[in-house]
Structure formats: structure tokens, C-alpha cells
Amino acid sequence: MKKSLFSMTKMLFLFVFIVPVAVVSFYYYMFASDRYESLASVYITEEASQSSPFDLTLLGITNTGSARDILVLKSFISSPQMLALLDKDLNLREHFTNSKIDFVSKLADDASKEEFLEYYLTRITITFDDEAQLLSLSSQTFDREFSKKILTSILKHSQIFIDTLNENISSSQLKFFEAEVKKSEDALTAEKNKLRAFQNKYKILSTSIATQTIVTTISTLENQLAAKKSELTSRLSVLSEQAPAIRRLRSDIAGLKQQLTVENARLTSGSGGSLSELDAQFQDIKLLIEYKTLRYKANLDAFEKAKVEAARRLRFLTVVAPPTLADEALYPNRPYIIITTSIIALFFYFILSIMVATIREHA
Amino acid sequence: MTLARVTNASNYGIMGKCFSLAVLKNHVTISSKFKPLTPAQELKAGFTRFQSVIWALYFKEFKIRLGKSKTGIIWVLLEPVIAMVVISTIWLIIRRKTIENVHVMLYIGSGFIIYLIVRRGITPIPQGIKSNSSLLNYPGVKPIDTIFARFILEMWLHMIASILLFASLFWILGIHPTFPDPLLCFQAIGIAAMLSLGIGLLLGIYGTFYESVGKTVRVFTQPLMIMSGVIYSMNDLPQRGREALSWNPIVHLISAFRQGAFGTKPFAEYDLLYAVYLSIFILGISFIAYYANRFRLIQK
């Protein structure tokens, strides 16, 4: 009985401890393919600084803008889309289904897309460091060059992804202001064309200058008229009405008077072509131009501001550590796995054997 | 084995009947001890006895629980519900209706379901040895049986309490978990139960030897609820806090349970395997401790 008791414990030890540990060690030392790890880390910078005065993270009010962006990037990297891109670039599936890889760690030849994605996610680790706002990437494949290539490709596609995000933001914001500026510019040009047409039609550069000229002419004529009239009065006291000098003076005065009425008529008259009326039209046009210039200026200002704002909201993917090239295969970590397995198996054995012993004690 | 003891035991109703049965069987084996048993026979006989002792103790414990005070059992059944309501009210006062898109009541309640499993390994389970110490005089009763019996009783009561919690939430508020991954929930509950048994046995053994062990542990585990992610989401904590708390296996179990029940995202450091390893480790340690001290425990 003593012997059989001993052998029962031994059997338990054999099947619960020795066999599993032996199988695991055998597999890991004889079959398991080496995996090479490549590491990289990136972070996303944003021009605008967003600092909140209180740290309310404990109450669930969390995450600044760039943390959100980096989490978006994280989910993009672990998405089927990224896998498809990588597969197109590097023929990922072929690498993972390579027959040289041991049967446990290789991807099945007829793996579905979902299985492939799951497998891909076990080979890629993405960890987000809260404090440094850093995204650490690591890839493990069966070839040291390939690990690096995967990470390089991931970073390339991430860059493209961030650029697309930027483009979407800036284009949607700037498009509106750009259209506004164009509209007001067109309106201003149309108004200026109207002014030019007006000037061409009436052969006038500016109504105010024309008015000035006429007023000067009238005053000169008035002066001359006054001079001629005083000369006539003084001559009449010496000469008779029929004297040739008097006659000449009278015809001069008549000429000046006629010219004065003509000039006055040019300045103001109800017949439409007068300068005052042109002036009114001219002032209207000028006012509109002024108004449209102001609008154009305001729109241009807003556009510039939006441009700056968009630039401030631009995100940049900054590579902190470029993908590394593994020197030796760190994975699978054989001693670690075997020690862990041994400890777990040993404790499992303890539990089982003591359970058996306890049960037997009841007998 | 005196018959007087057997008749004494039968005065205790159901418990007594089952118990006397177990003891009588023991009597039979002792009388047939002349013929050595093969290990297989021994194991079979031992298992039958083991089972009947555990059930006898289980019914005794249950009767005591029921008989001592009716409020006691109501309190046990309502503990998760009351804890959930109190904590959720605090959240609702600061106007947080959902955590990770799950109703606060459900979220907190699910945390308590796992937390209380482990918590029971600290308070009622270890005291099993002491409260049944008079029964340890019977050779058929081993100290570990008392722990097992109490463990089964506590888990059973807790299961009813948990069902009550979900049922009351569904009845009153009309909310219920969606259970996208029910297997994960059962895994979490199973691991938590294993952890609870390990802790219960370990504390039971050393609590019996040293009075201060149980008290010290109870004092030091007062803040356990806050440190287990029961009343908040681990995802809301800063990284340093999460890293520190992820040493606590309950955090992983609760996260796993919530993932299975609501489909919420587990926190970054989540690793259910850690909780599994730790539970096996603690259970193994407690078994070793039991095996080494099993005779001293009876003498106590």
C-alpha cells in the first residue's frame, strides 16, 4: 500500500508537472521559430496648446485634443485597412504563412481575413504612454529586416493618414472663406468697371475737377465782364455812343454775358447732361466702390485669420525613435516561458496532490 | 468513535442527520481497517466521505445563517444591491449617468458582483474553521471541509444576490447587461471564486493560529473596494494610477466581467492571465499551508 501511494503521487507529478514542462521546453527549444522585434515611437504635435486649468481626469472628464488624435491613430494602426495596406506593400500574409515557421506560431494557410487580423494584432503591440503622450510601436516577425520594414511601412501610412486628416480640416474651413473673398472681389471689379464705363462715356476723369474748371472759367468771365463794364462807363463820359471804341466794348460785354450763361448752363440745368447730375451719379458709383472695398478687405482679413487658425490646428506626426533593426531574437523568451510554466504546473500539482491526499485522509 | 457522540449529533436536525451519516460511515471503515484498501478504493471511499461531510457542514452553516437572525440573510442577499445604490447615488449627484456608455447602476453593480466574491474570502469564509472547531473532534471532519462548506454556501448566496441585483435593476429601471461575451463573465467569476477560496483557506489557517492575522487583514483590506476599480472606470485613471492598481487582480477580473457583460473596453494594462496565475499561486500556497498545518489545526 505504501508503495502504491508513493507511485500515485509520482504519477500525478509526472503528468501534471514533468510532462507539461517537458512538452513546453521541447517545443520552445526544438521547434519554436525565433521572432525579431523592432521598436519605434511617435507622437503627434499640435500647434495650439490646450491646457486645462484643472485636472479632472478622475471624474472622467478626460483627454486633451492630441491624446484623442493619438488614440485615433492607434485604432487606425490596428484596423483592417492598415493590414490591407501592409499586405499590399510587403506581402504580409506570405511572410506569416511561410512553411519555415513552426506550426504553432505560423498563420494557417487558409486563414480568413478576420483570423489574419487577429494574428497581425498579436504580432504588433501599440502602447500609449499617457504622460509623455507617446505611442510606442513594436512588431515581431520571423525576420529581422521584415520587422523593421513593417514598422517603417506603418509609419509611412500613419503619416499619410495624419496628412489626410489635416487636409480635410483645413480644406473644409478654408473653402468657405475662399469663396467669400472671391465673391467680394468680383463685386468690386464689377463696380470699378462701371466707373470706367462712366468716365469713358462722359469723357470725364472726375466731376469735381470738371466743376472746378468751370467755376474758374465763370469767375474769370465775371472779372472780365466787370472790367469791361467799368471801362464802358468811364469811356461814355468822354466819348459819344457812336464812337467805335464804345461799340467794341458793348459787343465784348454782350459776348462775355453770353459765354457766362453757357458756362452756367453747363454747371446746372434741368436738361440731364449737366455736371451736377453727373456728379450725383459719380458720387453714387464711388460710394459703392468704397463699400465693396471695405467688404473685400474684411473678407480677406477673415480668410487670413482662418488660414492661420487652420495652420495652428495642423497635426504633425513626429517620429521620436525610428524603427530599429533587431540584433538578436528576443522572442520567444524561452527561459521566461519555461520558468512560468514550471511554477504554474508545480502549483497545479500541489493543489491536485494535496486535494487527493485530503480526500484519502477522509477514508 | 463513541455512539454517544453520534446520538448527540443527531439532535441538530438536518445537520445532525447528515452528519451522523458521515460519522457512521467513518465508523464502518474503521472497523474494516484490517483489510488494506487499494489507493483507488481509498480515493473513492474518501471522496464519498469528503462529499458527505461537506454537505453536512453546508446544511449546518445554512441553518445557522437562517436561524441566527432573519435580517442576517436578508443583509447578505441585499448587500450588493445596497452597495450599488449608495455608490451610484454619489455618481448621480455629480450628474454622471453613464460610465463608458453603461448605466451607472449596472456598471457599479457589476463591479460589486466580482468584488464581493473575493471579499467573502476575507470575512466570512476564514472564520469557518473556528466556528466549527467543536466538530473537528470527529475524525471524519477535516478543517478544510469547513472552509469548503462555507465557500460553497457563500458562493451560492452570492449567486442569488447577484441574480437579485440584475433582476431588480431590470424590474425597476428596465436596464440589463447585453452580455456580448458571457463566457468571459463566467471566467471572471470562476477565477474570482478560486482567488476567494485561496485567500479564505490561507486566512482561515493562520487566522486560527494567530488571532491578530484576521484583524490585521481586515483593517488593511478596508480600502480594497476603492483600489479594485469597483466604483469607477479604470480607463478614467491616469496611467500611473492604472499601473499601480493593476497589481490588484480584482481590477482585472472586474474589467473582464464588464467586458463580457457590456462590451466595454478593458484598460491598457489589462491582463486576465495575471489574475489566473495569481489565483493558482495563492490557492497552491494555501493548500501547502493547509497540508503542513492540518494536524495542528485539529489540535487547536
Image (cartoon, coloured by chain):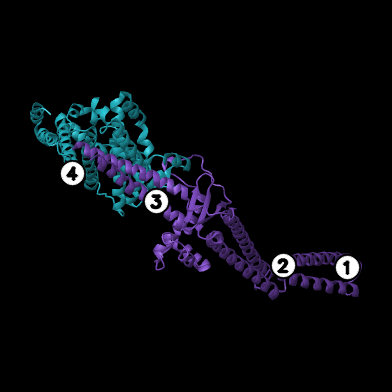
Q: Nearer the viewer, mark 4 or mark 2?
A: 4
Residue wearing tag 3:
A22
The numbered mark 4 sits on a residue in which chain? B
Q: Nearer the viewer, residue B287 or A92?
A: B287
Residue wearing tag 4:
B41
Disc 4 and disc 2 on one polypeptide chain: no
Q: Helix or strand or loop: what does disc 1 sit on?
A: helix
Q: Which quarter of the figure has residue B70?
A: top left
Q: Of the residues under marks 1 and 3, which one precedes in the sequence?
A: 3
Q: Are marks 2 and 3 in contact (CB under 8 Å)?
A: no
Residue wearing tag 2:
A206
Q: Are marks 2 and 1 in contact (CB under 8 Å)?
A: no
Q: Which quarter of the figure has residue A27?
A: bottom left
Quadrant in which the N terminus of chain A is drawn: top left
What whole-number distance in Å separates the C-alpha atoms at marks 4 and 2?
Answer: 126 Å
- The answer to whether residue B113 is seen in the rendering is no
The chain coloured purple in the image: A
